[in-house]
Amino acid sequence: MIGGVFGGLGMGGGTFLIPLLTIFGGVSQHVSQAVNLIAFLPMSVIALFIHIKNGFVDTKTAAIFILPALLFAFLFSFVAQYVDGVLLKKIFGAFLVFLSALFFVKDKRKDKLL
């Protein structure tokens, strides 16, 4: 529920859900990332339809990213099965640090992303 609240505020819910499950729930990294993906799928489909309905999605540009995103998501879901949980935690932590730095740079450049 806490992950969903923060996800609704604009920060990805998984940014909070995965650490909450692993640190406070005692759930393995693999299971917490799977739970996050399962929770994300219906929410993202609903959000996409709402954003398309409200005219917030450039469907031509989005179409360019859909196929590569699906291919990489499918590929790395299989790769993640074979990565040690400790390494997976480190990769996820590095990803969060990268996102933080990216938001900091974006903010300092007046909303111009790199």
Image (cartoon, rainbow, N blue to C red):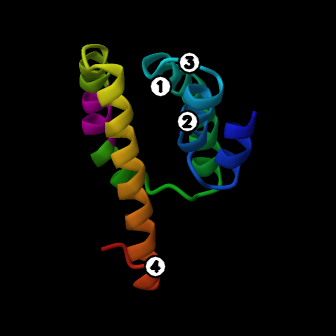
Magenta-span inclusion, residue 36: no
Q: Tell me, for residue 27, which label it has, or none.
A: 3
Q: Is residue 40 above or below residue 11?
A: above
Q: Distance between the residues labelled 3 and 4?
A: 36 Å
Circle 2 or circle 4, nearest the eye = 2
Secondary structure found at label 1: helix
Q: Quadrant of residue 13?
A: top right
Q: Which of marks 1 and 3 is nearer the N terminus?
A: 3
Give the camera-side residue of 5 and 97.
Answer: 97
Magenta-span inclusion, residue 69: yes
Q: Main secondary structure of the magenta part?
A: helix
Residue depicted at 56% across the width and 18% down the height: 27
Q: Residue 34 location in percent, x, y?
A: 48, 20
Residue depicted at 46% across the width and 85% down the height: 110
Q: What stretch is highlighted in magenta?
A: 66-73
Determine which residue is flagged by label 2.
19
Q: Residue 92 location in percent, x, y?
A: 38, 39
Determine which residue is flagged by label 1.
33
Q: Earlier in the sequence, mark 1 or mark 4?
A: 1
- Please state, as top left, top right, bottom left or bottom right, where the C terminus lies in the image: bottom left
